């Protein structure tokens, strides 16, 4: 079943000289897909993920259809709640709220989705995820008290806690040793196999684990 479709999507940044990192890209993402995007630094891989991210970035041209809905028809408010429910974003930079602990950062994602008091079961699920990612003893640490790799693992927990339909993973193995990188890739594979879908940007050998691989080159998405 189709989850998301990009139809002739382009993005032009107008700061200084015009830059067009995504040029007339069409792509269909379906349940079970594990799609990999590769390409040199600065080509537009993160831009492409932000475009897929439910209004995080709006296309200059083209349409983004998610679950049959045209994203351009939703207000910013609708997009925000829709995004919290449907998309798990592993940002390239480990963007955690500095004043919240690892556990609270994950609980905040839960709260932003349901907008009501969390249940004990939800808190326990957050803790179980942190434990799975080796962070049980670090759950109550603030981001600045965590190593970069530990922060990245918190980001992984946060992106899956709401059981989204699509995970957008921007260089999710950065800062991780091979043990934890394998764990994260395994989580992504399992997520896709269980009727989710994953789009992963990765420039390391972990990119080979994606089932459909593309290269972004001068704005064009080329199957490899
Ligand atoms: N907000 C912005 N305004 C203007 N230009 C931007 C903006 N964001 C990105 N760009 C430009 O778009 C191009 C693509 O950037 P992007 O971050 O998508 O690349 P990337 O492929 O993810 O690179 P990396 O592998 O280094 O993460 C770059 O030339 C960048 O300078
Ligand atoms: Mg990037």
Image (cartoon, rainbow, N blue to C red):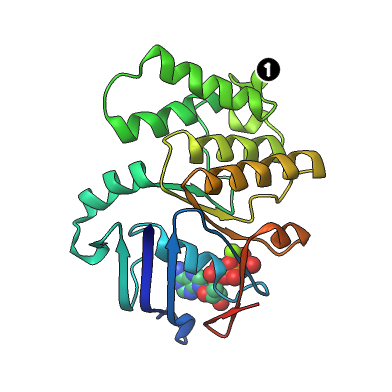
The N terminus - image quarter: bottom left
Q: Residue at x 65, y 77 (%)?
A: 224
Q: Residue at x 29, y 30 (%)?
A: 114
Vertical side of 71 occupied by 63: above or below:
below
> Which quarter of the figure has residue 13?
bottom left
User: In the image, 57: left or right of 198?
Assistant: left
User: In the image, 169: left or right of 180?
Assistant: left
Spot occupied by residue 188 in the image (x, y as percentages of width and height): 59, 46
Disc 1, SS: helix
Quadrant of picture, ligand 1 = bottom right
Q: Residue at x 26, y 61 (%)?
A: 68
> Which quarter of the figure has residue 130?
top right
Q: Residue at x 57, y 21 (%)?
A: 128
User: In the image, 174: left or right of 35?
Assistant: right
User: What residue is disc 1 on?
Assistant: 137
> Which quarter of the figure has residue 221?
bottom right
Depth order, front residue of 6/42: 6
Residue situated furthest top in the rendering: 120
How many marks the image carries: the answer is 1
Spot occupied by residue 160 in the image (x, y as percentages of width and height): 49, 38
Q: Residues within 10 Å of mark 1 (few under 14, many from 20)?
A: few
Spot occupied by residue 18 in the image (x, y as percentages of width and height): 44, 86
User: In the image, 71: left or right of 44?
Assistant: left
Vertical side of 201 occupied by 186: above or below:
above
Vertical side of 10 occupied by 28: above or below:
above
Spot occupied by residue 176 in the image (x, y as percentages of width and height): 75, 44
Label 1 CB sits under 8 Å from any ligand 2 atom: no
């Amino acid at each position: 079943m189709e989850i998301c479709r990009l139809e002739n999507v382009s993005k032009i940044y107008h700061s200084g000289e015009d830059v067009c990192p995504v040029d007339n890209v069409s792509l269909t993402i379906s349940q079970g897909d594990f799609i990999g995007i590769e390409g040199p630094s600065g080509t537009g891989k993160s831009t492409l993920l932000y475009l897929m991210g439910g209004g995080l970035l709006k296309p200059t041209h083209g349409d983004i259809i998610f679950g049959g809905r045209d994203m351009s028809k939703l207000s910013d408010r609708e997009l925000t709640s829709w995004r919290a429910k449907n998309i798990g974003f592993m940002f390239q930079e480990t963007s955690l709220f500095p004043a919240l602990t690892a556990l609270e950062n994950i609980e905040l994602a839960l709260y932003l989705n349901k907008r009501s008091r969390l249940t004990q079961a939800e808190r326990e699920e957050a803790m179980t995820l942190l434990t799975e990612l080796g962070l049980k003893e670090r759950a109550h640490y603030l981001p600045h008290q965590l190593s970069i790799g530990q922060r990245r693992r918190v980001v992984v927990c946060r992106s899956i806690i709401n059981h989204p339909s699509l995970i957008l993973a921007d260089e999710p193995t950065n800062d991780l040793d091979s043990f934890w990188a394998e764990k994260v890739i395994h989580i992504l594979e399992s997520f896709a196999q269980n009727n989710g879908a994953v789009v992963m940007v990765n420039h390391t050998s972990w990119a080979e684990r994606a089932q459909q691989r593309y290269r972004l080159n001068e704005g064009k998405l080329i199957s490899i």
